[in-house]
Amino acid sequence: MTMDKRALLGAYRKMSRIRAFEDRLHEENATGDIPGFIHLYSGQEAIAVGVCENLDDTDHIGSTHRGHGHCIAKGCDVHGMMAEIFGKLDGLCHGKGGSMHIADLSVGMLGANAIVGGAPPLAIGAALSAKTLRNGGVAASFTGDGGSNQGTAFEAMNMAVVLQLPVVFVVENNGYGEATGTDYAVGTSDIAGRAAAFGMPAVKVDGTDFFAVHEAAREAVERARAGGGPTTIEASANRFYGHFEGDAQLYRTPEQVAELRATQDPLQIFRGKVDRRKVTAREFDEVDEESRALVDDAVAKARAAEYPPIEHLLTDVYVSF
């Protein structure tokens, strides 16, 4: 796979924005001004961006409770996201969704989802729609290793094979379903192998390596668009923060986390794989500075924004046909 300078910087910019967004939220959450739980995506950036760089705005993704990275990778507005997380009227969902329910249908983001294993059924619905309309659309679902045990995921995979739907099931294996290790909770070390048993291509990739994820996703998306049916990608990458903000992380030591940050940082791995004749270290640094400035501005504007008025309490609840 070859990518020109513009494509390389575009992919790195999204990964950098995710990291800046999540690291800043880690700080902001400590102030007590953010309502509800937040689950941070730092350490898994290469998965979301590697997949979504192969998708268009007209394609759809289903997300998880750890959805900020998926949102940014799919093209959601950072300012709208931050306002949403702060519960403000200017948010993507007018402050009513918060961190675990961000959605933006204008870019094909079906929404973060607090239901474990909730994304695969949504994604096959979008894929069935694309197949029925014959518009060439593809859907992708993101699910964790814990969510991969859910019957919803298995049923969606089976239906996708039976109907030969244009969908890509992405399993983000970050080692833990909340605080329970994958080696205990998942009956096999090969989650992709379970998916293959339904009759679809399934691969395992290094989820810290953008280029490995991108190539696997490219093949899967091209197969789906051509009518070749579903694919599963199991991408392994450990999250840097706890399951949620406030997680004591008694299941791993600070030394283990420090080792992960030192050796399995997707941004640093990306930098190390790019030919310096294409992109210089200074250019990467400039992208990181730009990302931090963007997030700083988003936080400032979110803090200054208005909350939804009380008369909006019962709007966006029911749809009348």
Image (cartoon, rainbow, N blue to C red):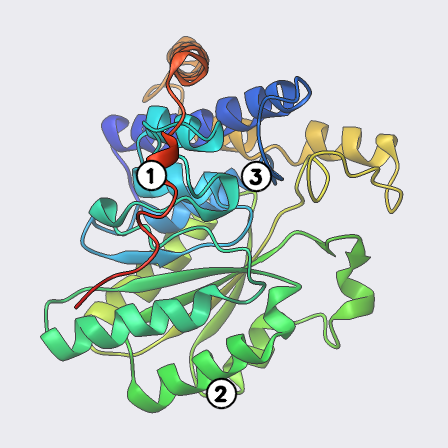
Q: CA distance from mark 3 to mark 1?
A: 31 Å
Quarter of image, res 130 = bottom left
User: Would you place residue 128 above or below residue 85 in this image?
Assistant: below
What label sits on residue 312 in the rendered view?
Answer: 1
Q: Nearer the viewer, mark 2 or mark 3?
A: 3
* Marks 2 and 3 in Cβ contact (< 8 Å): no
In the image, taking residue 155 as reference, residue 167 lies left or right, namely left
Q: CA distance from mark 2 to mark 1?
A: 45 Å
Does label 2 or label 1 sit earlier along the sequence?
A: 2
In the image, taking residue 125 as reference, residue 273 lies left or right, namely right
User: Would you place residue 66 above or below residue 110 in this image?
Assistant: above
User: Would you place residue 123 above or below residue 266 in this image?
Assistant: below
The C terminus: image quadrant: bottom left
Q: Secondary structure at mark 1?
A: helix
* Marks 2 and 1 in Cβ contact (< 8 Å): no
Does label 3 or label 1 sit earlier along the sequence?
A: 3
Q: Nearer the viewer, mark 3 or mark 1?
A: 1
Residue denoted by label 3: 41
Label 3 is placed on what type of residue?
Answer: Tyr
Residue at 27% over, 26% down: 5
Residue at 44% over, 69% down: 120
Please state which of residues 76 and 44 is positioned toward the viewer in this rendering: 76
Residue denoted by label 2: 198
Q: Is residue 93 shown to the viewer in this render? A: no
What label sits on residue 17 in the rendered view?
Answer: none
Label 2 is placed on what type of residue?
Answer: Phe
Q: Secondary structure at mark 3?
A: loop
Residue at 42% over, 81% down: 200
* Neighbours of disc 1 within 10 Å: few (<14), some (14-19), many (20+): few
Q: Residue 184 in the image: x percent, y percent?
A: 83, 67
